[in-house]
Image (cartoon, coloured by chain):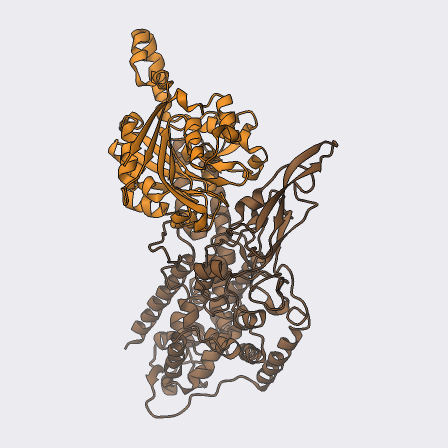
C-alpha cells in the first residue's frame, strides 16, 4: 500500500470513529419518542452506548484488576491488534487523539525549526508510564483512579457533562428569546429549534456539580497542543502508555535508509508521537502513534513501514527507572491515603446517595470509572459527580442530588448503561419489589409548612411513589400564629416503605433546603448503613 | 402585547367576521351561526357509557358515547386544530390507572381525524420526566401509531398569561399548546387524590400550567376551579375504564385499581366530575371543587337538571 493511501485511510478511520463516539454520546439519553412494547419490559437505550469503554483496554484491565469485573472481549481484540501492529488504536481509533490531532493539523502552533524541536523525544514522555503504573498498581492495591485520566472516560465526561450542557445554555438563551416573540414566525422558529436542540444538549438545562472544572480541564488539555502537538497522547495518556508497552513485540517496523536521507526534517515536523522517525536516530516504537505521516512526507524514500516477519523485539520502551519506582510507590500509597478520611472505615457522608443498583461502597470504588455515562443518561438529571461526598478516593463518582432531580421509581436506566458494573443492571420489577433502597427521607419539622403551623401542604405525600405510600398524613389541630386552632394534615415517613427516591425532597415547596430531605441511611447496598432490622 | 385570553387566530378571525356580519346582515344572521349554540346547550347533556360484555371494544364504546352526544362533528369541525389533554403526569404503566387509558386516547384521536381535524395534538405538562411519562403511559405509542403530535412540555412553551380567578389572580405560566387550539378535549382519568379527594376533569388543568404548582395545592379547590374556568374545554371525556381508588394520585399497586369500564362525556365540567364521583361511592356535593364549581357558575352537579343518556355495550 502506498503511503498516501495509508494516511487517507487513517484520516477516514479517525473521522468515522470520532463521529461514532459523538453519536453514541448524544445517544446516551432517553429519547422523547421511546415507548414500551411489552408489559414487563424495561426502557433501555437502543445504541451500544458503552462501546468505546468496552474497546478501551485500560478500562478493561483496571476493572479486572480492581473489581474482578470483565467488561467485554473488545478490549482484548484491541490489545491483540496492538501486539501485532503497535499503537494503531492511538492513530486510527481514539477519538480524543483525533481531536488533538485535528487541532494540531488545522493550526500548527509552531513552525520551522521550532516545530522540529517540539517533536523531539523528551524525558517528559515518561510521565505517562508513571501514570500507567500508578493507576494499575493502585487498582491492585484497592483504589481504581484510572477513570480520572483514561482518555475515553475523560472525553466522555468532559463533553457530556461540561461542553454540551455549556453550549446548551447558550443555545437555549437564543431559543427562549425567539419563542417569547409575538411574531408568529420567530415564535415557531423558537419552538422548532428547541425540538432540534433538546435531544443533543439536554431537555432542560442540565446541571452537573463541578462541571465548570471539567470544562476548564478539557480546554487546558486542548490548549496543550500549542506547546507540543498531541501533548496529551505523548506525555499524559495512560492508555497510550499501556499500548506503547504492548507495541514492543509488534511486527510493524519503520525501515530507515540512511543513504537516501537529505536531513530535510520533514518527517520530524509531521511526527505526531515524537518517536524519532529521522534516519540516524533510533525509532521509538512505543512512542509511535502509527499515523504514517513520516512515511508519507519523505520525498527521498528514506523511510518505509514494513512488516517484520522474522521473530524479534522492537526497541525497548523508554520508561525510566524513576517513572517505574514512582508509579509503584504512588500506586501503593494512594489507596492507603484514600482511606484516611474514614469514608469507608468509619462513617460515610449522609449525602452520598448512590444510583439504584450500586454495589457496596468498597466494590463501587473498585469498579467506577467516573465516566459520567450514568449522569448523562439519567432522565431527571439527579445523578451528579461528587466533589468531596465520597472522599478523595471517590472524586467524580456518581451521587444523587435530590434538589436537582429525583430517582424515578420505575427507572433503571443508569444500571443498564454502566460499562463496568459499578451500578448493576437491575430491572424495574426488582427495584420495586425487592425493593432496592437508595436511602431514606426524614422530615425537618421546623421547615415543614403544616408542622410549623403555616398552612396545609401534602406535596410530599402526593408524590410518594410507593404503594402504600411511605409518607402518610395524620390530621391534627395546631395553633396558628394568631392563636386560633387550625386543622392540618401532618406528614410522617414510614421508613419501612421509604426507598429514598427523593421525589418528596425534589417537589417540596420549601426550596433550597427542603423540609423533607433524603440521606443514604437505609440503603440496600450497605449492611452497615441499615436503619431498621 | 401579552396574551390575556386564550384566543387563537382562527377565533379572532371568527370574532371579526361575527362583528362584521352582525353589522351587515342584521341580528338574524348571527343567531343562525353556530357560535350562538351555547344558548341551546344550556339544558346540558351528560352521557355515561358502560362496557358490560366481556372483551368489548373500548374504541367502539368511545365512538358510541360521542354518537349519543350527537356525534363527534358536534364538537370538532373540519380544519380544526384540536388539542387533547390527557392525564399522563406520572411515569406509570396504564394498568395502574394513574394515567389516561391509551385505548381511549387512541379512539378520541381517530374520531377527531374522522371529523376532519387539521392537526391533533396531545399535550400535558407532566410531573415526572415527560419522556418517561410518554413511554410508560402508552401516549408515545399512540402518537406514533395515530400520527397525532405529542407535545413535549418545553420551557419555551410556557408563556405568562393573565388568569383572573378567585384565588389565582395575575400572571401565571401556561402551557401554550393547550390554549392555542380551536378545540380542546379534556381527557382525564378518574382517580383518588390525597388532597382534593379525587382528581377528575377540572383538576386535570393543574397539568396545563407551569410555575410553582405546589403553591396551587395550598388552596386546592379554589385553584382547581380558577383553572377550569380559564381553560374552558370544548368537551370533557372522563376515562373511568379503570379507576384508582386509593394511594392517589400516583398509586403504584394493582390492588388500588378497580375496573369500571365507564366513560363519561359532557360539555359541563362540573356535571362530568359529579357523575365520576359516584363511581367512587362518594357524593358530589362533598367534593370541594365540585361544590365550588357550581357556585362559580361553571356547571351543575344537580344531575336531574341535565339531559342524561346511558350507552351500554
Q: Residue at x 50, y 27 (%)?
A: B285
Task: Indicate the quadrant where residue A320 lies.
Answer: bottom right
Give the x, y percent position of residue B181: 37, 30
Can residue A336 be spotted in the picture?
yes
Q: Residue furthest bottom?
A: A311
Give the x, y percent position of residue A348: 65, 65
Task: Indicate the quadrant where residue B106 lies.
Answer: top left
Q: Residue at x 70, y 45 (%)?
A: A446
Q: Nearer the viewer, residue A114 or B191?
A: B191
User: In the rendered view, does A118 fall on the left or right side of B145?
Assistant: right
Q: Nearer the viewer, residue B92 or B159?
A: B92
Q: Residue furthest right?
A: A483
User: In the rendered view, does A257 fall on the left or right side of A503?
Assistant: left
Rendered orange, the chain in question is B
Give the x, y percent position of residue A155: 48, 64
Number of residue marks: 0
Decide: is B100 above or below A378: above
Q: Quadrant of the C terminus of chain B?
A: top left
Task: Indicate the quadrant where residue B311 lies.
Answer: top left
Palette colour of chain A = brown
Give the x, y percent position of residue B193: 51, 40
Can residue B232 be spotted in the picture?
no
Q: Nearer the viewer, residue A46 or A471?
A: A471
Decide: is A519 above or below B123: below
Amino acid at each position: 500500500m502506498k503511503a498516501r493511501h495509508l494516511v487517507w485511510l487513517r484520516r477516514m478511520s479517525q473521522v468515522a470513529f470520532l463521529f461514532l463516539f459523538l453519536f453514541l454520546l448524544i445517544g446516551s439519553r432517553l429519547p422523547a419518542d421511546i415507548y414500551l412494547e411489552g408489559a414487563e419490559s424495561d426502557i433501555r437505550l437502543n445504541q451500544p452506548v458503552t462501546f468505546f469503554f468496552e474497546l478501551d483496554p485500560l478500562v478493561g484491565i483496571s476493572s479486572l484488576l480492581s473489581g474482578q469485573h470483565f467488561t467485554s472481549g473488545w478490549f482484548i481484540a484491541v490489545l491483540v491488534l496492538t501486539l501485532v501492529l503497535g499503537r494503531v488504536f492511538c492513530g486510527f481509533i481514539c477519538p480524543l487523539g483525533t481531536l488533538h490531532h485535528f487541532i494540531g493539523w488545522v493550526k500548527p502552533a509552531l513552525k520551522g525549526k521550532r516545530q522540529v524541536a517540539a517533536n523531539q523525544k523528551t524525558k517528559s514522555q515518561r510521565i505517562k508510564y508513571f501514570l500507567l503504573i500508578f493507576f494499575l498498581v493502585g487498582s491492585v492495591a484497592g483504589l481504581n483512579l484510572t477513570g480520572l485520566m483514561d482518555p475515553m472516560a475523560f472525553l466522555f465526561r468532559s463533553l457530556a457533562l461540561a461542553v454540551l450542557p455549556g453550549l446548551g445554555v447558550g443555545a437555549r438563551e437564543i431559543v427562549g428569546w425567539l419563542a417569547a416573540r409575538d411574531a408568529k414566525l420567530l415564535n415557531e422558529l423558537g419552538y422548532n429549534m428547541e425540538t432540534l436542540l433538546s435531544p443533543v444538549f439536554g431537555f432542560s438545562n442540565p446541571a452537573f456539580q463541578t462541571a465548570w472544572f471539567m470544562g476548564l480541564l478539557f480546554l487546558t488539555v486542548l490548549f496543550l497542543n500549542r506547546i507540543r502537538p498531541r501533548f496529551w497522547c505523548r506525555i499524559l495518556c495512560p492508555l497510550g502508555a499501556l499500548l506503547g508497552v504492548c507495541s514492543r513485540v509488534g511486527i510493524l517496523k519503520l525501515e530507515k535508509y540512511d543513504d537516501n536521507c537529505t536531513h530535510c526534517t520533514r518527517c520530524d515536523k509531521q511526527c505526531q508521537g515524537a518517536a524519532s522517525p529521522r534516519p540516524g536516530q533510533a525509532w521509538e516504537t512505543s512512542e509511535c502513534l502509527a499515523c504514517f505521516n513520516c512515511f508519507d512526507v519523505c520525498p527521498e524514500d528514506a523511510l518505509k513501514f514494513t512488516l517484520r516477519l522474522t521473530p524479534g523485539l522492537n526497541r525497548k520502551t523508554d520508561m525510566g527507572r524513576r517513572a517505574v519506582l514512582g508509579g509503584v510507590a504512588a500506586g501503593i500509597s494512594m489507596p492507603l491515603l484514600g482511606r484516611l478520611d474514614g469514608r469507608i472505615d468509619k462513617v460515610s457522608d449522609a449525602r452520598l446517595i448512590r444510583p439504584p443498583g450500586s454495589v457496596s461502597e468498597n466494590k463501587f470504588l473498585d469498579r467506577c470509572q467516573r465516566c459520567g455515562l450514568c449522569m448523562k443518561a439519567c432522565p431527571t438529571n439527579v445523578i451528579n459527580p461528587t466533589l468531596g461526598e465520597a472522599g478523595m478516593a471517590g472524586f467524580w463518582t456518581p451521587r444523587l442530588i435530590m434538589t436537582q432531580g429525583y430517582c424515578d421509581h420505575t427507572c433503571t436506566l443508569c444500571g443498564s448503561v454502566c460499562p463496568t458494573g459499578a451500578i448493576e443492571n437491575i430491572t424495574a420489577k426488582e427495584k420495586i419489589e425487592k425493593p432496592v433502597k437508595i436511602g431514606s427521607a426524614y422530615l425537618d419539622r421546623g421547615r415543614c409548612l403544616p408542622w410549623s403551623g403555616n398552612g396545609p401542604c401534602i406535596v410530599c405525600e402526593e408524590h410518594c411513589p410507593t404503594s402504600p405510600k411511605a409518607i402518610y398524613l395524620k390530621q391534627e389541630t395546631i395553633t396558628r400564629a394568631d392563636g386560633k386552632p387550625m386543622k392540618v394534615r401532618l406528614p410522617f415517613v414510614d421508613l419501612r416503605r421509604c426507598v429514598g427516591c427523593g421525589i418528596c425532597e425534589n417537589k417540596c415547596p420549601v426550596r433550597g433546603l427542603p423540609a423533607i430531605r433524603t440521606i443514604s441511611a437505609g440503603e440496600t447496598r450497605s449492611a452497615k448503613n441499615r436503619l431498621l432490622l | 402585547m401579552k396574551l390575556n385570553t386564550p384566543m387563537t387566530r382562527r377565533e379572532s378571525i371568527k370574532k371579526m367576521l361575527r362583528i362584521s356580519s352582525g353589522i351587515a346582515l342584521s341580528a338574524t344572521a348571527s343567531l343562525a351561526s353556530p357560535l350562538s349554540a351555547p344558548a341551546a346547550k344550556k339544558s346540558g347533556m351528560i352521557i355515561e357509557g358502560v362496557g358490560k360484555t366481556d372483551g368489548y371494544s373500548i374504541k367502539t364504546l368511545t365512538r358510541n358515547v360521542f354518537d349519543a352526544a350527537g356525534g363527534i362533528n358536534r364538537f370538532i369541525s373540519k380544519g380544526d386544530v384540536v388539542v387533547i389533554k390527557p392525564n399522563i403526569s406520572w411515569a406509570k404503566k396504564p394498568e395502574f390507572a394513574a394515567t389516561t387509558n391509551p385505548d381511549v386516547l387512541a379512539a378520541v384521536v381517530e374520531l377527531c381525524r374522522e371529523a376532519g381535524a387539521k392537526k391533533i395534538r396531545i399535550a400535558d405538562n407532566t410531573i415526572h420526566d415527560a419522556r418517561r411519562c410518554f413511554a410508560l403511559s402508552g401516549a408515545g405509542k399512540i402518537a406514533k401509531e395515530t400520527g397525532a403530535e405529542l407535545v413535549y412540555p418545553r420551557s419555551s412553551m410556557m408563556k405568562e398569561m393573565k388568569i383572573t380567578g378567585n384565588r389565582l389572580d395575575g400572571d401565571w405560566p401556561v402551557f401554550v399548546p393547550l390554549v392555542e387550539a380551536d378545540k380542546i378535549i379534556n381527557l382525564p382519568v378518574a382517580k383518588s387524590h390525597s388532597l382534593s379527594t379525587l382528581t377528575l376533569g377540572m383538576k386535570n388543568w393543574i397539568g396545563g400550567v407551569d410555575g410553582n404548582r405546589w403553591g396551587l395545592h395550598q388552596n386546592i379547590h379554589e385553584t382547581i376551579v380558577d383553572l377550569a374556568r380559564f381553560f374552558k374545554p370544548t368537551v370533557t371525556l372522563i376515562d373511568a375504564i379503570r379507576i384508582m381508588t386509593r394511594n392517589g394520585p400516583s398509586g403504584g399497586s394493582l390492588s388500588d385499581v378497580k375496573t369500571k369500564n365507564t366513560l363519561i362525556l359532557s360539555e359541563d365540567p362540573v356535571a362530568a366530575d359529579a357523575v365520576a364521583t359516584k363511581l367512587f361511592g362518594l357524593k358530589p356535593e362533598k367534593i370541594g371543587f365540585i361544590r365550588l364549581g357550581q357556585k362559580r357558575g361553571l356547571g351543575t352537579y344537580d344531575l336531574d337538571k341535565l339531559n342524561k343518556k346511558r350507552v351500554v355495550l
